[in-house]
Amino acid sequence: MSGALRISLIFLFIGLLWVTLSDALAFYFIDDKTTLQQVNLYKGYFFMIVISVLLHSMVKSNNKLLLKKTKFIADAEELAHIGGWEYFPTERRMVISKELRRILKIANHKSDFDVTDVADYVHPDDIKLVRDKFSAAVTNHTNLRLVHRAITGDEQVLFVEQIAKIEYADGLPYLVRGTVQDITQTIELRDTLAKTSQENQHLLDIMSKIKSMVIITDKNGLVTWINPAFTKRTGYTLEDMAGKRPSQILHGPETSAEAFNAIQQDIINERYTKVEILNYTKTGEKYWVEVNITPIVTDNRLSGFITIQVDITEKKAYQEKLQHQNTLLNEVAWMTSHEIRKPVASILALAELSKHASSREEKDEYVDVLVSCVEDLDNIVRHFTAKINTIEQNKQAE
């Protein structure tokens, strides 16, 4: 029930009750006509006084309620950065709220304006847009809704959204009520997000095309994205990896615990790390990778990690071959300096001794020992040749 109807009904009830009861009581207790007239006169005065007091009290109460509602609306407008306005087309007059004056930074504190004065706060490049939208709403008898730029009193450019309802009389608009909301921050945030999204997509496109394996994890180290090169090398898809730590999937029996602990420590300390580690594919194949993990920091806060893994399996195999060849060469060098020298020294000594043999039997004995030394030397040379052949075969295999 509205306040006006409630007040009207209360006064109607009191008036009917007063007339009915007061007249009946007056006729019952007073017989003298003169006295009755005076009583009726005072009764009227009393009724007017009581009614005035009641009316004042009720109007005051309703005014307080209206002020509360008005303040509530004003506070809501301020918090939401929404200003209200009313436009009277026939009078070309606009009434704007306090919050709208604040949004547009209008120095004039009055609430009534000529429509041309308010139009000065619309960005010059958007005036036609506003007029066309308003004309279309009137023609189609629809509500008005549009986003455009506004110029504030201190010449700042804002993005605002207008929503309005048009009321008609005899088919013509006679009142337009609407709101204006400052959405500059929303537009700027949208543009920033769009730009960031484009940059992120460009980055993902690049990472999708590189041959190195790429893993992106959140700040807790759980996988959120992998590139096609990772799937191609390991056989694991994003569905296999998502929400898990890479170590849970990729590490195996021969993975170095020392290398794993080094990675974990750098992740905990949010540091860049580089380490070589043995991983396993989905089929169980072992492969070596050089792991480069970089923290992703946004607004000075850790948001995740990007891991780039380079397959160094062939490099590791080559290093093992080099190590094996170096071992063989060291053995050859040792054989040259020790094992060959021993029989050669014996042969030289026996040859010298045979020159001074005093009998045929002594000389034959020297010859037998000499033959044995030559056979030992032959065996050493054969072994030496085998080592050399192994080195040559390894070189050819490369």
Image: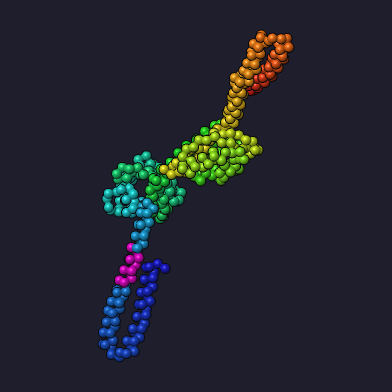
Q: Position of residue 113 (x, y in %)?
A: 30, 51
Question: Is residue 371 at all visible to an observer of this figure?
Answer: no
Position of 180 with respect to 198 (left or right) is left
Magenta residue span: 56-67
Position of 389 with respect to 134 (left or right) is right
Answer whether residue 257 is magenta in the image: no
Q: Residue at horizontal 71%, vertical 9%?
A: 359
Query: Magenta span: helix, strand or loop, mainly?
Result: helix
Q: Residue at horizontal 63%, vertical 16%?
A: 345
Q: Residue at horizontal 49%, vertical 37%?
A: 273
Where the N terminus falls, by quadrant? Answer: bottom left
Q: Which picture quadrant has residue 330? A: top right
Judge whether 6 appears above or below 173 on screen: below
The number of numbered badges drawn on the structure is 0
Q: Position of residue 69 (x, y in %)?
A: 36, 62
Which of 262 and 274 lies nearest the eye of the viewer?
262
Q: Which picture quadrant has residue 10? A: bottom left
Position of 335 with respect to 118 (left or right) is right
Answer whether residue 58 is magenta in the image: yes
Report the residue that reaches farthest toward the front.
358
Which of 320 and 338 lies nearest the eye of the viewer?
338
Judge whether 206 appears above or below 269 on screen: above
Question: Is residue 360 at all visible to an observer of this figure?
Answer: yes
Judge whether 189 appears above or below 312 on screen: below
Q: Residue at horizontal 37%, vertical 51%?
A: 81
Q: Position of residue 49 (x, y in %)?
A: 28, 76
Q: Where is residue 48 in the image (x, y as percent from the top left)?
A: 29, 76
Where the C terminus falls, by quadrant? Answer: top right
Judge whether 200 appears above or below 31 on screen: above
Which of 160 and 114 lies nearest the eye of the viewer?
160
Which of 35 and 96 lies nearest the eye of the viewer?
96
